[in-house]
């Protein structure tokens, strides 16, 4: 049951390390909150939710539609449904970054697997093909040459969903064995980590290790601008640094995991997020 003074909610179907830490931070501050499980959430046209909801739902579509439904019922959601819609889709993210003039790898969008051959020719090999929606580097495929592309795109054409036939093609940026993750909360960069891995996809979920990176003004400014471009108040921004030191924005994660970041820093990320959510609820 929700107390009459409860103004905060945490939306999550799976309570992972991050959600446990956020809930513990709220408890330490003596703040009443409710855990909303989207698997049992129903929002109808006569529902009223005077809440500030921290969206930590792991599934993109459930996070998106739960946020939209809760907003329609009067709740304030962090991040908004609009931010989740953009940052959860790689092409919409790229489009938002380009609209703001932010550096991002060269990208093309092909409406069919057949047209993707032309897109790959335009971008040049080696290139990367990514699903529009997805995380942890799943189904992200490096394509070294046209012969490999033929087999990959035949597989894409056989996938059942029409959305999967829209092919997102991006240049493969030559980089060191690491990328840079910057955490942004409320328009401020908290810090940065290098994520190093044994393979070209440097996702912590794929075994990459996070180590502290000295946050520069360049990192901070670019990450904050990227988060603002997609409308995210809380975000993990992934940056790539090429051999010449030039930075590009790869992705903006709206429901960011921060265990690796917290292991590399003395920053209590969960407490910062909890503090920000409390301030938004009080406002």
Image: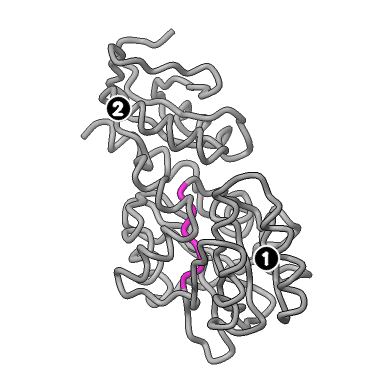
Which residue is disc 1 drawn over? 202
- Image position, residue 175 (x, y; %): 63, 81
Q: Residues within 10 Å of mark 2 (few under 14, many from 20)?
A: many
- Image position, residue 100 (x, y; %): 29, 69
Q: Which residues are magenta?
A: 249-254
**Residue 109 against residue 37 in the figure, above or below:** below
Quick check: 19 left or right of 98?
right
| Residue that sits furthest to the bottom in the current view | 244
Seen at 46% across and 41% down, the residue is: 271
| Residue that sits furthest to the front in the current view | 114
**Residue 263 against residue 51 in the figure, above or below:** below
Quick check: 114 left or right of 107?
right
Q: Which of the two labelled residues, at mark 2 and mark 1, occupies the earlier sequence position?
A: 2
- Image position, residue 52 (x, y; %): 33, 30
**Residue 26 against residue 234 in the figure, above or below:** above
Q: Looking at the image, which is closer to me, 214 or 156?
A: 156
Q: Looking at the image, which is closer to me, 270 or 150?
A: 150
| Residue that sits furthest to the left in the current view | 283
Which residue is disc 2 drawn over? 75
Residue 30 among magenta residues = no
Q: In this view of the protein, can residue 204 be seen by the observer?
A: no
Identify the element where label 1 is drawn. loop
Quarter holding residue 71: top left
Quick check: 235 left or right of 21?
left
Quarter holding residue 203: bottom right
Seen at 69% across and 57% down, the residue is: 139
Identify the element where label 2 is drawn. loop
Seen at 38% across and 71% down, the residue is: 222
């Amino acid at each position: 049951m929700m107390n009459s003074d409860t103004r905060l909610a945490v939306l999550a179907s799976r309570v992972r390390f991050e959600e446990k830490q956020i809930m513990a931070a709220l408890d330490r501050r003596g703040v009443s909150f409710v855990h909303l499980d989207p698997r049992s959430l129903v929002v109808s046209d006569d529902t009223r939710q005077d809440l500030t909801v921290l969206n930590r739902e792991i599934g993109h579509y459930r996070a998106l539609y739960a946020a939209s439904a809760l907003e329609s019922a009067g709740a304030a959601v962090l991040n908004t449904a609009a931010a989740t819609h953009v940052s959860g889709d790689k092409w919409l993210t790229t489009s938002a970054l380009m609209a703001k003039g932010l550096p991002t790898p060269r990208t093309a969008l092909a409406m069919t697997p057949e047209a993707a051959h032309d897109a790959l020719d335009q971008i040049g090999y080696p290139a990367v093909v990514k699903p529009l929606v997805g995380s942890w580097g799943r189904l992200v495929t490096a394509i070294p040459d046209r012969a490999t592309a033929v087999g990959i795109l035949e597989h894409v054409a056989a996938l059942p969903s029409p959305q999967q036939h829209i092919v997102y093609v991006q240049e493969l940026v030559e980089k060191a064995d690491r990328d840079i993750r910057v955490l942004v909360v409320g328009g401020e960069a908290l810090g940065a980590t290098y994520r190093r891995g044994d393979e070209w996809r440097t996702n912590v979920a794929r075994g990459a290790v996070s180590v502290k990176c000295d946050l520069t003004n360049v990192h901070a400014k670019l990450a904050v601008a990227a988060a603002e471009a997609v409308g995210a108040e809380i975000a993990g921004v992934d940056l790539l640094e090429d051999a010449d030191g030039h930075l590009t924005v790869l992705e903006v994660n709206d429901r960011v995991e921060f265990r690796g970041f917290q292991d590399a820093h003395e920053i209590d990320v969960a407490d910062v997020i909890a503090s920000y959510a409390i301030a938004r609820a009080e406002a």
